[in-house]
Image: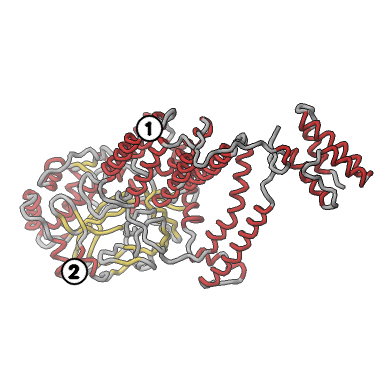
Amino acid sequence: MPACARWPCCRRPRRERTEGSAPVLPGGTRAWTLATAGLGLLPLLLILPPALAAALAVAAVVVTAASWRHSLPSWLRLLLTLAMLALVLALMGPRMGRDTGCALLAAMLAIKPAESHHLRDARSLLGFSLFAPFAAFLLDQGPLTMLLGLAAVLSALLSLQRLADVENEAAPLPLREGMRVMGRLVAIGLPLALAAFWLFPRLPSPLWGVPERAIARPGLSERMEPGEWLDLMSDDKPALRVRFDTPPPPPEQMYWRALALWNYDGRAWTPEDRTAALPPPHVEHVAGKEWRYEVEMEATDRRRLVALDLPVEAPGGARLGHDHGLASARPLAAPTRWQLRSAPARSFEPELPPDVRRLALSLPPGRDPRTRALAEQWRREAGGDDAAIVARALAWIRSEFAYTLDVPLPGRDAVDEFLFDQQQGYCEHYSSAFTVLMRAAGIPARVVVGYAGGYPNPFGGYWIVRRMDAHAWTEVWLEGRGWTRVDPTAAVAPERVYDTIEQRRSVEDAAAGIQALRLDNIGNLADWLRRGWNDLVLGFNAERQQELFRPLGLERLRPGQLLLVFCALAAAAVAAMAWWLARGERERDPLLRAWHRLGERYARLGLGREPYEPALEWARRVAAARPRAGQELVALSQRFADSRYAPGHGGLRQLVQDLRRHRP
């Protein structure tokens, strides 16, 4: 017979338990608790480095299996803890950061199932597992992380309900009924959460600093060295999304500028700190040709912005450098949007300061003697014609060089090996060697890194620039024109393009039997959904918050006014929550629920059922006081008693409906 908290005769006696005792969990409840902990750990594992995530997942499975029947001894749990610490530090490095802290949390949660046999341990495991999805939001705020986090929270609520049933020695709720109860709990708290998201005043900066990551996100680095970009060039995730307000330039003219690299040590190129203090040089843009567009930058945890070559001015919250690269005032820890304007340059720094000229001609001593000799020969033959030397170098590349990703690592004289021995490589090799060759010939030159190209997403009407579109080119300084873009990689003849990322992907897709067009459409649709998430959720800033009130005729609300509106709606939401909770817990059995409500209706007339009074006796007493309504109540009471004490009598649904319809 189902238990009922309201009627004393239906209550199940509870077993007295000595203080401090910890009941052992049934196998089904423990399995549900462990599954919930795994679901909470999942969004964090998907963000951590793959090798570490796989190791932690294996450790969690092994620890759970080893401790399923009996708890592990204390010395073994201590050994596991030390092993997890060593594993995280070995794979993440000794530098602490946001991702290192999240990895340590995941490691501790992976071995926590070793202590999950008792009620108290299970509640601790669920409490700790809820930290995992919240920690995942520190590393990624995407829709998948949100969905997995929400699923983990709902599963944790269901698990806590099952643990409460174990503690009360009650049968666990069916899954469907439990989901309904949890749904009501979420619905109660949802208005307050929405009020906080929409109306709490948005601060220009967080109240506390978020620690840096120990391992940087994939993206353009401020260092270029042959071989370091291969992982980035094989990553097809979006780096930025662009929506043009004017007709866009052709894709072959889309050079997305990030920063210029000045210093070369014989192997790697790096920026020059001294140029950061210099003001932007004079630029004369081509009249009547300007692009206006909005760039959505994915999070990089760096300050570097990317703009179409050349940006006209810096947007709010950013600074325009001497090389016309843009830098944000704060690290890009989340997706951001920037309104930009760019235009091609007619002349870019036509007067070169002596310090900048010396910097743009510097080369490491004793390196690449064959390149220096060739450059000196070209200078003697060309005289003072710098443009002729540039054209001669491009013609040499076009006639003899090839493009491929399969290139060995360079030796001491990297440029000599590339120009005279290998004569094949990709953009890092071409831009580096071309810049060194120009400097050796007395032409100021620098390497510029960014992205090249992009493609339109047919679902969203915007352009996608992927990480694999990372590119490096050269800028040479020519008299009367200033800095001029030269892309030596683009000079390679098409018939000598042997191996590209796109070709490798096509071969892999064909080998796997994948229809590329269909996958591209799915990817474009998924990216459109991700962009909508960034717009509606992650991009909800102070300006968007003000737009909520403009349809009401309120142009702008001050932070104090916003706070008052939030407090008013929050108070209303809390009052609604209090009213809902004051109604008491809803009876799970629909028949008992209808019977209790029937009793409440008679209680308003002073004919309520006494706690000690059987159902039929109560109905006969009501019939004596109210003969007309009492006879129907007697019949209903008889049917109710038959249904409760003679299961399988039938007509349960009809009885519930009749009890609901009956009125005194």
- Which residue is label 1 attached to? 72
Q: Nearer the viewer, residue 445 or 391?
A: 445
Task: Measure the alpha-carbon separation of dots 1 and 2.
Answer: 72 Å
N-terminal of the pair, mark 1 or mark 2, is 1
Percent from the top left, x then y, of residue 548?
A: 57, 64
Identify the image quadrant of residue 438: bottom left
Percent from the top left, x then y, of residue 522?
A: 47, 41
Res. 55 in view = no
- Which residue is label 2 attached to? 352
Res. 342 in view = yes
Secondary structure of the residue carrying tag 2 is loop
Q: Which mark is residue 545?
A: none
251 vs 203: above or below: above
> Is 190 displayed left or right of 256 in the figure?
right
Indicate the amino acid at tag 1.
Leu
Percent from the top left, x then y, of residue 165?
A: 59, 38
Q: Nearer the viewer, residue 132 or 319?
A: 132
Q: How busy is the neighbourhood of tag 2: few (under 14 within 10 Å), some, or many (20 plus)?
A: some
Which residue is found at the position 41% from the left and 53% from the top?
Answer: 241
Nearer to us of marks 1 and 2 is 1
Indicate the amino acid at tag 2.
Leu
> Is 192 displayed left or right of 296 in the figure?
right
Percent from the top left, x then y, of residue 405?
A: 24, 40
